[in-house]
Amino acid sequence: MPKASTLFFTSPKQVEIKEILLPALQDDEVLVETICSAISAGTEMLVYRNQFPHLKDAHDSVSSDLNYPLAYGYACVGKVKELGKMVNGEWKDKLVFAFQPHTSHFITKTDSLIPIPASLSPQTACFFPNMETAVNLIQDGAPILGERVLVLGQGVVGLLTASLLNEFPLESLILVDNYELRRKALVESGKWKEE
């Protein structure tokens, strides 16, 4: 049986990498070797501090039993290494995104994988959940031609939201952040000016 090195939140403010046995590969599954995974600082700090809500997660691959020890994370990019007998051979060596915890390897069905185009690096593809959030925020806000828009916070989601909104024909786009380092980085990027 294949093994995986997986990050576990073992108790409040404690993490550990454990070696786990993966289940046997079924005919309709693939084995993915992780290249990189992104840390969601906000969500994962809630798990780390034992402040997360005890609700069932929308993603099947993320544990709905939010009790310690807990393997958590949801931004994993890897390469398909092994195929079950019924899986189309085109999946072999394909670069994919998955809503999986921080782990070296995982087994899943292909319908839970998102193929990554060659134009994206694995590191960039890790930001898929953040971009999904940014797109949803813009769709919910439904900005219209000539409108003034304010984006509060320039963390990952705020930056992605602002970058997308910068393509809209808005009267103005105002970005606000409490952290001087983030404000300075915005100005240094050349896309934004401080007022």
Image (cartoon, rainbow, N blue to C red):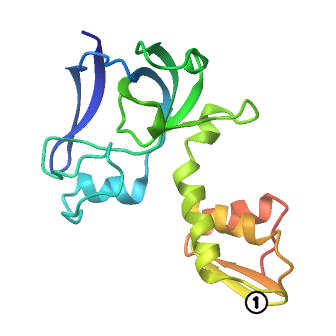
| Residue 177 horizontal side relative to residue 100, left or right | right
Q: With 47 as the anchor, is 33 left or right in this view?
A: right
The image shows residue 1 at horizontal and vertical percentages of: 24, 9
Q: Position of residue 176 (x, y in %)?
A: 63, 78
Q: Quadrant of the C terminus?
A: bottom right
| Residue located 67% across and 33% down the image | 121
Write down the residue under mark 1. 148
Could you tell me residue 72's position as x and y percent?
Answer: 30, 44
* On screen, residue 112 above or below 162: above
The residue most toward the top is: 1
Q: Residue at x 18, y 53 (%)?
A: 66
In this view of the protein, can residue 104 be seen by the observer?
Answer: no
Q: State left or right for residue 143 relative to residue 93.
A: right
The quadrant where residue 84 appears: top left
Q: Nearer the viewer, residue 83 or 124?
A: 83
Residue shown at 22% from the left, 64% from the top: 55
